[in-house]
Image (spheres, rainbow, N blue to C red):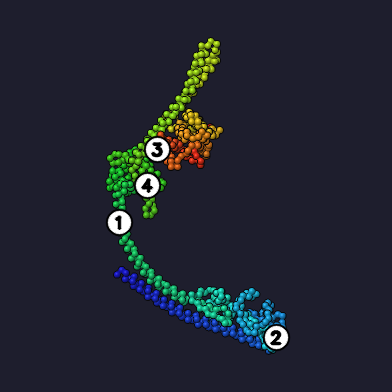
Amino acid sequence: MSYAPIIAIAIIVILITLFILLLRKDRVDELRTKLIEDALWVEQNLFFQLRTHEENLERLALEISKGQDPEVVLTRLEHIKGIHPELQIISWFDLQRDEPLTLPRGYNAQPITAPLPRFKAWFPARKDEQLNEVLVDFQVPIFGANNQPTGLLRTSLSLNQLLTSQIPWWVAGQYEIVLVDNNSDRVIARRVNTALKTSELSYSMSVDPPLHGVRLQLKPYTSGSTSTQTLLIIVIVGLALFAIISLLVQYYYARKRQQAEHALLDEQAFRRAMENSMTTGMRARDLEGRILYVNPAFCRLVGWEANEITGLAPPMPWWPPDMVNETLDRHYQQNRMPTAQSFETRFQHRDGSILDIQVHEAPLINNQGKHVGWMGSIIDISSRKAQEERTSQQAEQLQKTAHLMSMGEVASTLAHELNQPLSAVASYAAGCLNLLEDTDSSPDDLRSGLQNLAAQNKRAGEIVRRTNDFVRKREPLLKQEQLRPIVLDSLSFIHNEMLKHKVRVMLDIPEADLYVMADRIMIEQVLFNLLRNALEALKNQPLDQRKIDINIQTRGQYALIAISDQGPGVAPEMMPLLFQPFSTNKVNGMGIGLNICRSIIELHRGTLWYESSASHGATFVFTLPLAKHD
């Protein structure tokens, strides 16, 4: 029964529509019949007028052939042209005259050419440039005494003037009347009312003869009464449709309301199931910090029940006592800048255990678009924090292990470096003893020997101090350091190996002193590892390729240090793993050297990367921030 009004209105609309369609069909048929009748009448009227012009010219031609006075003929022509405005040009051609007699006077008519025609004829429409009109020509021959043509009369009719003068106003007020060229479908004459619109109906018919290749076309204008009737019909149908739509809308919203109630029940059930299955804690609070909502995961996280938590105001029982002020201050800052935020904090479980927590909070907006609180997701990251701590300790232990591995190679350098100054100390000591036993020796000779002995002893102490600094583990200390001595000291640690394997070192260091913010010992370890890798890559290369290039330059606010060798380079499959720990293709390597080097450079706010050469070899480049030095 709820559909009965809609069905009734729909039947009424259908019946009204059918009635309208029948009325319109009858109206269209009536208009079409009247259009055809009026078109036939217009065509007959035009045909009659054109035949009248033919007869007039034929009578004049007959009178001229009988010897009528030319002045009388010219007067007759002027009279005919005066009473028929569509006759734009009338010309009398005579073989005895050089130029034709033409009306209007001054019109430049084209002369005729022999032989003269013997029959009357209508010509196709043409555009006359002198009069800027579309004209149709009709000519009648003039015969002499021996029945031979001696001239002709030619008249040119304006098609626009023909429609204007020969179609009455009561017909022109109902139709748009045009003459159309059959060959090009181009309108060559028209009588229209531009203020009115035409309907879709039209009727066309040929006017050939006498107008060759021309057809007459009529289109009725739309009437005001038709528009009014159409408007009334549209209003009636519109009101019926409005009634149907109103009923449908009411029915639709009733169904939607029923569906919304079911969907709300389903959504509530789904939300409860989702809340109970989530492992991430969810918490909503207002701007004063009062708890509005918590899910079961949050309750498990803090050890309190939902009914115990909802409605609580700060401070919360799960806040550690030493973090109450910090948390309150964070709430205050959040309310001042209501944007999504992420931070880490700590919660105290009901059993007293401390948890590391990561919180993601976003503004809580109500349905009026007003900020009323905060919605947060809480994740327990205690396990991740513990894992990060273990990873950090392992990385530190690996760095220590790598440092200790470097000590073995430094030890041989230390023995070689100390051997020379200690041998010199022994030599100078023996020389000084000999000078003491020689009674002829002077104190200056003894003083010189003792000074040299002291210098060698100082040199040995400096070698021991530098080596001790290199192998000693301590916290990073960033300060202004000159870059050149760091590079030279790093080369001294590996100098013996380079001599042993006949490896040359090419230094390209700017003359001006460069100062960087760095921990000297750490940067020496980076340079030592990179130089040692380059040396190992060159051991099996030809002698002319055993060369290491050290290039230092500045780039913006950074110093750029590049160490290049001409070895075999890095295998393509190793490039993605180059700086990952425990990735190596060396037989005795651990694969942690480059990873430690990158960590040290990143600690200095620099970057370490690898560049492959187009031909062969490898280049490791790192940057260090420049330091201002007075």
Q: In this picture, is 617 found above or below 414?
A: below
Q: Residues within 10 Å of mark 1 (few under 14, many from 20)?
A: few
Q: Mark 4 sits on what residue?
A: 361
Q: Residues within 10 Å of mark 2 (few under 14, many from 20)?
A: few
What residue is drawn where x is 37% and y is 44%?
331
Instruction: Answer with mark 4 or mark 2, whichever residue precedes in sequence.
Output: 2
53 or 565: which is nearer to us? 565
What residue is drawn where x is 52% and y is 32%?
504
Q: Mark 1 sits on what residue?
A: 266
Residues at marks 4 and 2, CA–CA distance in whole angstroms: 113 Å
Q: In this picture, is 277 found above or below 125?
A: above
For label 4, the SS is strand
Could you say where residue 458 lies in the image, as x and y percent from the top left? 49, 22
Q: Residues within 10 Å of mark 4 (few under 14, many from 20)?
A: many
Q: Mark 2 sits on what residue?
A: 70
Residues at marks 2 and 1, CA–CA distance in whole angstroms: 110 Å
Q: Mark 3 sits on what residue?
A: 582
Residues at marks 1 and 4, CA–CA distance in whole angstroms: 27 Å
Q: In this picture, is 501 found above or below 20?
A: above
Instruction: Answer with mark 1 or mark 3, whichever residue precedes in sequence.
Output: 1
Which quadrant of the figure contains the N terminus?
Answer: bottom left
